Image (cartoon, helix red, strand yellow):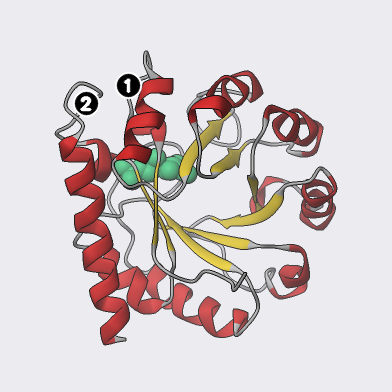
Amino acid sequence: MQFDRRIKIAPSILSADFADFGAECRVIEAEGADWVHIDVMDGHFVPNLTFGPAMVKALRPHVKTVMDVHLMIAPVDPMIEAFAEAGADRLTAHLEAGPHIHRTLQAIRAAGCRAGLALNPGTGLDGVENLLDLIDLVCVMTVNPGFGGQKFIASQIDKIRRLRALIADREIHIEIDGGVDPATAPLVAGAGADVLVAGSAVFRGGSVGNPAPYGANIAAIRAAAEQARRAA
Ligand code: DX5
Ligand code: ZN
């Protein structure tokens, strides 16, 4: 199958109802989500604490698309096997999470998952070049990781453009995480991103009992991004 560079929307369940994650996953997929983005935070690498492999395992039967697991933890390596066994399709680790990111990415692939590399807003592209043959995705953080609902950091757009050029025709996705909504989606899609993570902009206004706003929110982000893609 050809590499899919179409726009994909990946709702972050960080903005879902924490008491009803299974139903939230089923509902966002029914409303058009392409991937489900799961934010793992350790209260150490980032100043917030969410959930671990047991939650990923519990959600696995509820996610039919792609479980895109964003690891905001340090160290990463001791946890890779557990997340892979829990059923994660993709594991994304931060470049900043330790001195041996190369080994971490090797370990993710060895565990049978697609490997992603996440970059904080303060991190440049210098460290990426030597990792290109080990990754399936680069996640450009457009907020400082830790919380949903933060303001989009526009200085990252130029970084996305340079990353797109660096990737060239390699089969590597560019994912954007943080502050993505119908106003910012065109900026990142026009710069070369294809996977758009969105938490608050997807879940706002809806609920498991009233899922239609989720669908409208996903469609609005997708339409804005696709329009910018066509214009680029
Ligand atoms: C932030 C997380 C994001 C977050 C995005 O650390 O990695 O995935 O949920 O939330 P919004 O879309 O609200 O900025
Ligand atoms: Zn995330």
Callout 2 touching callout 1 (CB < 8 Å): yes
Name the quadrant of the C terminus.
bottom left
Residue 176: x and y, percent?
A: 43, 59
Determine whether 152 is above or below 170 in the image: above
Residue found 76% across the figure and 36% down from its top: 80
Q: Is residue 43 visible?
A: no
Q: Is residue 202 visible?
A: yes
Residue 146 at x, y percent in the picture? 45, 37
Beta carbon at label 1 within 8 Å of ligand 1: no
Quadrant of the rendered image containing residue 21: top left
**Image quadrant assignment for residue 202:** top left
Residue at 70 percent across and 32 percent down: it is 83
Q: CA distance from mark 2 to mark 1?
A: 8 Å
Residue 136: horizontal and vertical position, in percent? 66, 62
Can you say whether 100 is above or below 158 in the image?
above
Q: Is residue 188 left or right of residue 209?
A: right
For this view, does 98 lie left or right of residue 28?
Answer: right
Above or below 230: residue 16: above
| Residue toward you, 176 or 146 | 176
Residue at 61%, 40% (x, y): give it: 71
Quadrant for the N terminus in the image? bottom right
The residue at which mark 2 appears reads as 207
Q: Residue furthest front?
A: 1
Amino acid tagged 2: Ser
Q: Which residue is mark 1?
A: 17
Q: Secondary structure at mark 2?
A: loop
Q: Amino acid at mark 1?
A: Asp
Mark 1 crowdedness (10 Å alpha carbons): few <14, some 14-19, many ≥20: some
- Crowding at mark 2 (Cα within 10 Å: few <14, some 14-19, many 20+): some
- Percent x, y of residue 46: 53, 35
> Which structural element holds mark 1?
loop
